[in-house]
Every structure is written in structure tokens, then in C-alpha cells.
Image (cartoon, helix red, strand yellow):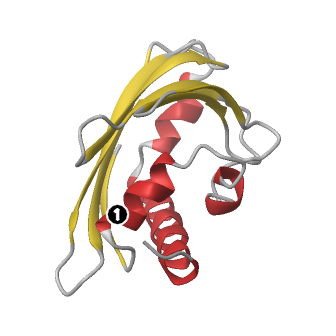
Amino acid sequence: MRFDVDTKASPELARRAFTDFTDHRPRIWNRTLDPRKYELRELGDTWAVAREGTAGSPFWVVVRYDWSDPGVIRWTTVESSYGGAGDGLVRITPGTGGGSHVHAEWENTGARATQRPLLFLLHLPPMQRLIARLWTTTLDRYAEHERP
């Protein structure tokens, strides 16, 4: 999956939204993160391991995030309900006229055969557009309510 979004959130705020692993994370990402599936397992200065899933989805993942590179947030799936793995990244750059440009890409690999059709749907253009809209709305809302 690969998509780009432009948001009102500054690069600093967008980065903070992606790397906030406090109890606020489920509220920040309330349209894409099920609070019942969220569990912070480990946290360092520039990394975190968390269990996450989307409401209504049968899937959850345990992901190791790394934001030691100031412009990129990377993640690797270390465990999943679908038997697969994967990795991805978000690259945040200043947007034209303020805000930021967010480039996201990730892939899922090695899923059990019975789960592959559902994961395939995730990579279709309509689903990518939906996720991009949800991220834009989330980051724009975050920018309106947070200060650097």
C-alpha cells in the first residue's frame, strides 16, 4: 500500500501524532485504532512496541515503531493475528503553504492462505483512498487541538 496526504498539521505535530504512545493514542487515532485492541508493550526514547487493530477488523498486529530518523517513522510487524509480517514507513516533510506532506507505504507478507483475500482488499485503490482520507481528517483535527 502506498499513498500521500497533505495535512494542516505541521511536520512536528504530524510526527507527534504518529509517535504518541500515551493513553492519548486511541483518542488521536479514534477513527482507525480500536482502543480495545491497543496495548503499549514497550517504550523507549525513539521506539515503541504496541498491539494495535482497527475497529470492526478481525486483525490485530504487534508492531515495533522506530522514529530515530527525524524525518521518518518506520515500523515492523513482529506478531499478527493473520500469521503474516510486514513493514512500512511514514515520511513527513513540510507542505506547500504550511502544514505537511505525509508519504506512507507498507506491505503485509506471509499471511495464512485463508486471510490473504481480506488483506488483498486493503491494497486496492478505494481502500487506500479511504485510509488516506481518515489520516488527513485525523491529522487536521489534531492540528486544530494541539500546539507545538
- Residue 116 visible to an observer of this rendering: yes
Determine crowd level at label 1: few under 14, some 14-19, many 20+ residues with C-alpha closer than 10 A: some
Q: Which amino acid does label 1 sit on?
A: Glu
Image-quadrant location for residue 43: top right
Task: Give the farthest residue toward the right.
Answer: 36
- Asked whether 115 or 10 is in front, the reply is 10
Q: Residue under label 1, please give it.
A: 12
- Residue 108 visible to an observer of this rendering: no
Image location (x, y in percent) of residue 124: 42, 48
Image location (x, y in percent) of residue 148: 42, 71
For the N terminus, which image quadrant? top left
- Asked whether 112 or 80 is in front, the reply is 80
Q: Residue at x 55, y 77 (%)?
A: 141
Q: Residue at x 44, y 33 (%)?
A: 45
In the picture shown, does residue 43 fall above or below 34?
Answer: above
Q: Residue at x 47, y 51 (%)?
A: 18
